[in-house]
Structure formats: structure tokens, C-alpha cells
Amino acid sequence: MIRYLSATAILTLILSASSVQAAETTIILKVEKADCALCAPIVKRTISKVMGVKTVSVVEANADSPAVATVTFDDAVTSVQTLIAATTNAGYPSHPVN
């Protein structure tokens, strides 16, 4: 019984330590080639399908600026590079806004 409790305590400490390192991150992506009315919903759906993404909002492109996606995600599950790859593979190359 003592071994079981010790193992449970150690496992709990390990799991709690790893969950502390995970954090929600928000990034803004400039999305190229998303200049029609149907593009923003496609970009939003594409990013939403990436594991670890919590929220996505996309502002449609206009004459003055390209489409912009604001994405909140769990950085322990996905990365900025994965988000960029998702939009690029859908035909909409993107990059972080500085």
C-alpha cells in the first residue's frame, strides 16, 4: 500500500510539473492570398482543425491590408510553425506579424 501511494505521489508531481510548463499563447498571423469573401472562413476552419488551437478569429482582407488571423493555442500541443504549415498547405501562406 505504501509503495502504491509513493508511486501515485511521484506520478502526480511529474504530471503537475509538466502541465505548469504548458501555456496558452496568442499569435497574429498575416495571411497572404486570402482576398475573397470565402477565404477568411476557410482560413479559420483550417486553423481551427489544428490540435491545441483554442480560439481563432480572422479579419478579412481589404484594399489596404491582407487578412489577419489571431490564434490562441496551447504551446505544449502545437507551435507557430504548425499553424503556418496548416495555412500554407491550404493555399494561404502566412507569417507572424512583428
Image (spheres, helix red, strand yellow):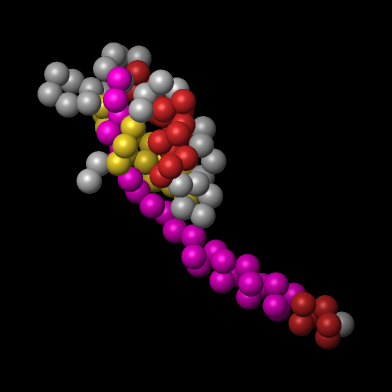
Q: Residue furthest bottom?
A: 2
Instruction: Reply above or below: 11 against 87.
Output: below
- Would you say residue 54 is visible in this rendering? no
Whether 83 is among the magenta residues is no
At horizontal 25% and vertical 41% (from top left) the residue drawn is 97
Q: Residue furthest right?
A: 1
Instruction: Reply above or below: 62 against 21.
Output: above
Q: Quadrant of residue 68?
A: top left
At horizontal 43% and vertical 38% (from top left) the residue drawn is 83
At horizontal 27% and vertical 33% (from top left) the residue drawn is 30
Q: Nearer the viewer, residue 86 or 41?
A: 86
Q: Where does the image place residue 85, in percent across and percent down from the top left?
A: 45, 34
At horizontal 26% and vertical 17% (from top left) the residue drawn is 35
Image quarter where the N terminus lies is bottom right
Instruction: Reply above or below: 23 against 97.
Output: below
Q: Where does the image place residue 43, in percent across and percent down from the top left?
A: 39, 26
Instruction: Reply above or below: 8 against 79.
Output: below
Q: Where does the image place residue 86, in percent across and percent down from the top left?
A: 46, 31
Q: Which residues are magenta?
A: 8-33
- Would you say residue 16 is visible in this rendering? yes
Whether 13 is among the magenta residues is yes
Q: Residue furthest left?
A: 64
Q: Quadrant of residue 57?
A: top left
Q: Where does the image place residue 74, in percent across and percent down from the top left?
A: 47, 51
